[in-house]
């Protein structure tokens, strides 16, 4: 072996040490790069989840493909008017229903002034060149058929029977317009407010028996009113009697049921007038509820609506029934 061999071995050992030290020094850089790739992959998944095109299918089996994030939305129902204005900028909405500006029923009168209006005239609706049109099962049948026949991007809502339906409609709208997070936040806010109402209701009393009444009709099971009563811990007298949805009732039924409270609705400024009219109704006037002054009148905007504003109706109902709940 050459005399230079020990010297060569020493050089090899030093070189190996430098390589090892260098590897440890570079390790954080490799780790950082790997994390960056992971973050990028995660971002791609999020983008993919929030991407378009999207597909919606209504209860009639009709499928709507939404190719890109809608920027010219037309709403033909008050519920979708109110939900849309809570989820997206008015600039993305080209027209709302005429009810959106009606102070008797709308919760979005001021915001609606910033957006166009569309009646149920098909030519007018099509003139907005919408990339998404919301209608409902109660929209004029001829309008629905003509819009669908033209191939317009129409989606029809059909369920409004309770809180779950309302929140599902909010989710659907959020998905359709690419605003899922805003929809989830709105639903969370609703649930938080409902829990606060529940928490303020006394639990040491017998459940009150309650009946709704308007123009001779009452609301049974499968209605938003029934859901409202469940939330405030009350019994729906009509549902108790086997009545479903909205049904015309007789004076004899009112007298036989003898509810603890009678609930109706009116426009702002007309509460006293409507209460007086009910007290002039023979069967209602003879009821224990009327004689004890237990007729609750709720604002039309909160009682008849099927959007997030139903929570205000629930609070008004609870406030009318329990002293512990503030209006």
Image (cartoon, grey):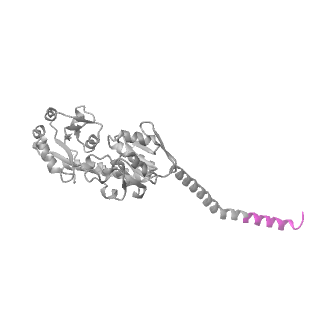
| Image position of 111 (left or right of 53) | left
Assign the C terminus to one quadrant of the image. bottom left
Q: Nearer the viewer, residue 113 or 196?
A: 113
| Image position of 262 (left or right of 98) | left
| Residue 270 visible in the current orientation | yes
Tell me how many marks there are. 0
Q: Nearer the viewer, residue 169 or 60?
A: 60
Q: Nearer the viewer, residue 292 or 30?
A: 292
- Residue located at (16% from left, 38% from top): 259
In the rendering, at what x and y percent does residue 291 appear? 9, 43
Q: Dominant secondary structure of the magenta stretch?
A: helix
Assign the N terminus to one quadrant of the image. bottom right
In magenta, the rendered stretch is 1-18
Q: Nearer the viewer, residue 9 or 299?
A: 299
| Image position of 240 (left or right of 79) | left
Q: Is residue 7 rendered magenta in the image?
A: yes
- Residue located at (41% from left, 58% from top): 91
Q: Quadrant of the rendered structure where residue 85 is?
A: bottom left
| Residue 57 visible in the current orientation | no
Farthest residue to the front: give it: 123
| Image position of 271 (left or right of 181) | left
Answer above or below: position of 20 versus 60: below
In the rendering, at what x and y percent does residue 193 appear? 31, 52
In the rendering, at what x and y percent does residue 171 appear? 41, 47
Answer above or below: position of 4 versus 153: below
- Residue located at (21% from left, 53% from top): 268
In the rendering, at what x and y percent does residue 211 appear? 20, 39
Q: Is residue 179 rendered magenta in the image?
A: no
């Amino acid at each position: 072996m050459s005399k230079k061999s020990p010297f060569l071995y020493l050089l090899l050992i030093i070189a190996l040490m430098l390589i090892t030290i260098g590897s440890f020094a570079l390790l954080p850089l490799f780790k950082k790069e790997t994390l960056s790739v992971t973050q990028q992959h995660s971002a791609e998944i999020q983008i993919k989840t929030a991407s378009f095109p999207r597909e919606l299918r209504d209860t009639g089996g009709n499928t709507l493909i939404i190719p890109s994030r809608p920027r010219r939305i037309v709403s033909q129902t008050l519920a979708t008017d109110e939900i849309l204005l809570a989820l997206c900028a008015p600039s993305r909405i080209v027209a709302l229903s005429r009810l959106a500006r009606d102070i008797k029923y709308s919760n979005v009168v001021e915001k609606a002034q910033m957006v166009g209006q569309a009646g149920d005239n098909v030519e007018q609706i099509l003139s907005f060149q919408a990339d998404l049109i919301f209608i409902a099962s109660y929209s004029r049948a001829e309008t629905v058929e003509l819009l669908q026949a033209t191939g317009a991007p129409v989606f029809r809502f059909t369920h409004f029977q309770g809180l779950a339906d309302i929140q599902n409609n909010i989710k659907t709208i959020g998905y359709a317009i690419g605003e899922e997070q805003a929809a989830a936040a709105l639903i969370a806010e609703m649930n938080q407010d409902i829990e606060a109402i529940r928490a303020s209701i006394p639990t040491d009393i017998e459940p009150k028996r309650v009946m709704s009444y308007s123009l001779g009709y009452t609301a049974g099971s499968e209605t938003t009113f029934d859901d409202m009563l469940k939330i405030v811990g009350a019994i729906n007298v009509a549902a108790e009697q086997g009545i479903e949805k909205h049904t015309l009732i007789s004076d004899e039924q009112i007298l036989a049921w003898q509810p603890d409270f009678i609930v109706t609705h009116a426009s702002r400024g007309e509460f006293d007038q409507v209460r007086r009219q009910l007290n002039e109704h023979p069967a209602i006037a003879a009821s224990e509820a009327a004689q004890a002054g237990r007729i609750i009148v709720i604002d039309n905007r909160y009682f008849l609506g099927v959007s997030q504003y139903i929570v205000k109706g629930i609070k008004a109902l609870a406030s009318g029934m329990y002293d512990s709940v503030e209006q």
